[in-house]
Amino acid sequence: MKSLKTILITGLGIFVLYGAHAQSTNSGKSMESPNPQDAQEIIESYVSDYRNDRFAADAMHFGIEIPNYGSWTIEITGKEVQSKWEVLMKDGLPKKPTFIYRIEYETLKAIHEGKINALTAQGKAFSGDYTPMSIKQMEGYEPSMEEYAKINPFSFHFWTRGFPEIIPFSEGMTRKAHGSNFTVFYYETGLRTAWYSVLPEERVRDDAREQAAPFPMLIVAIKGTTEGEVDGQSVSLAKGNTIFIPAGVNHKWWNETNEATEAILIMFGKGA
């Protein structure tokens, strides 16, 4: 197999999955031998669904690797065949250099069952962060900036079934980032969106390395009141209010109440 390098697609931070689906396939949760057919059937269900997706009009070539279960090549040709788009699947990793989704089986199963979405499973703040679903590039694959920019929105559309595409979110569907619990909604060039819940006594962006972003953001409070500090100034962000954080401005947050607080995060502009 050709060597792989991690594609630096950053999300909201370093995450830790909640619940049973957080565990590694090597955690000893099950003593049963892996059954490659289980993973293949899940992937086939996404391939079948994508044949009906309008975004399948754009050609895409990539691989999927499930450790201990198998690997597959997916070819989206962009051709329409009998009112559906042509999406081909075969065993083994691609022969032509491209990108590969490397997914732990428990995470693949959780995505399949609607317990977490693929963008949330991939998110990271730094290139060395662990994620149970990652995107790697094969040796020799050198995507242009335009090709690189397509990967996040493609991940959303391929790994989200049905139309219109619905993104559920709740406490049980999060991972942990920057000190609180996130679900990523959608990413494309110039736009990143997510929901987060800050539990009592949790602190968000307490690490100085994470307190400023190179792009502006809006934080829309939808539950409770979260205390914060923006550019050294104290602020309380209560339900029904939205705060604008300019690019490059330090900010951090914490929950002093007895209940979780919630907000929608919208990051936008150049660099987002």
Image: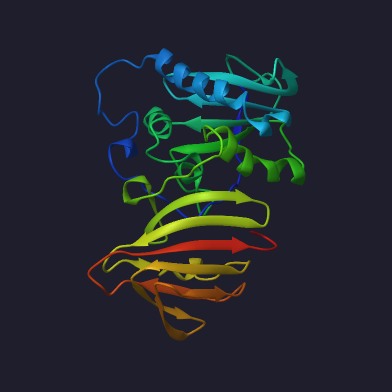
- Percent position of residue 156, x then y: 57, 40
The image quadrant that residue 28 belongs to is top left
Residue plotted at (58% across, 33% down): 158
Q: Is residue 24 left or right of residue 79?
A: left
- Quadrant in which the N terminus appears: top right
Residue farthest along the bottom direction in this orientation: 233
- Percent position of residue 134, x then y: 52, 38
Q: Nearer the viewer, residue 115 or 21?
A: 115
Q: Is residue 66 above or below residue 236?
A: above
Residue plotted at (63% across, 62% down): 268
Q: Is residue 205 above or below residue 3?
A: below
Residue plotted at (39% across, 29% down): 109
Q: Nearer the viewer, residue 261 or 149?
A: 261
Q: Is residue 93 above or below residue 101?
A: above
Q: Is residue 56 left or right of residue 10?
A: right
The image quadrant that residue 97 belongs to is top right
* Color encoding of the figure: rainbow
Q: Is residue 217 left or right of residue 96?
A: left
Residue plotted at (46% across, 41% down): 117
- Quadrant in which the C terminus appears: bottom right
- Percent position of residue 247, x then y: 62, 72
Q: Is residue 1 above or below residue 239?
A: above
- Percent position of residue 244, x then y: 56, 75
